[in-house]
Image (cartoon, helix red, strand yellow):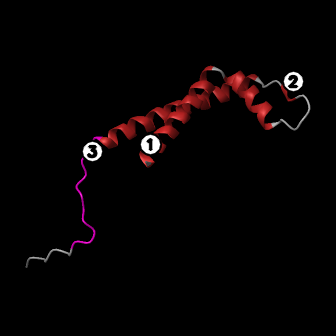
């Protein structure tokens, strides 16, 4: 169950990164409207060019992190770890 939730989380991070990398101005506009909904005229705010570049760069980082997480999760299914019985008595040491 936790593996499925981690995969969904990594997918969400990758999707956010893709949107931020491809559509930074629209993402900033949406974020501004949602976070400043109690203020008048939040739609009139214009982000500076450097801020859009920073959002795009962060989006590329999020995309890379999400894809890496998904690839690592896929790799964990292929590992065969030995089963360990926690309640087993310790084996006697040989002298």
Mark 1: secondary structure: helix
* Furthest-left residue in this view: 95
Give the dominant element type of the magenta stretch: helix, strand or loop. loop
Above-or-below relation of 25 to 1? above
Q: Reading the chain from its start, which is encountered first: label 1 or label 2?
A: 1
Inspect the magenta stretch and tell me whether residue 41 lies in it: no
> Distance from label 2 to label 3 (Cα)?
53 Å
Q: Residue at x 73, y 28 (%)?
A: 28
Q: Position of residue 91 (x, y in %)?
A: 15, 74
Figure check: 66 above or below 87: above
Stretch in magenta: 78-88
Observer-side mark, 1 or 2, equals 1
Crowdedness of circle 1 by 10 Å Cα count: few (<14), some, many (20+)? few
Camera-side residue: 83 or 62? 83
Quarter-wise, where is residue 62 in the image? Answer: top right
Q: Which label sits on residue 44?
A: 2
Magenta span includes 79? yes
What residue is pinned by disc 3?
A: 79
């Amino acid at each position: 169950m936790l593996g499925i939730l981690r995969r969904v989380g990594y997918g969400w991070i990758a999707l956010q990164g893709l949107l931020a990398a491809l559509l930074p101005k629209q993402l900033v506009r949406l974020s501004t409207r949602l976070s400043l909904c109690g203020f008048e005229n939040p739609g009139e705010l214009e982000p500076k060019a450097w801020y859009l570049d920073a959002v795009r760069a962060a989006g590329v980082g999020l995309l890379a992190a999400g894809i890496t997480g998904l690839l690592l999760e896929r790799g964990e299914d292929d590992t065969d770890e030995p089963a360990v019985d926690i309640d087993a008595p310790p084996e006697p040491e040989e002298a």
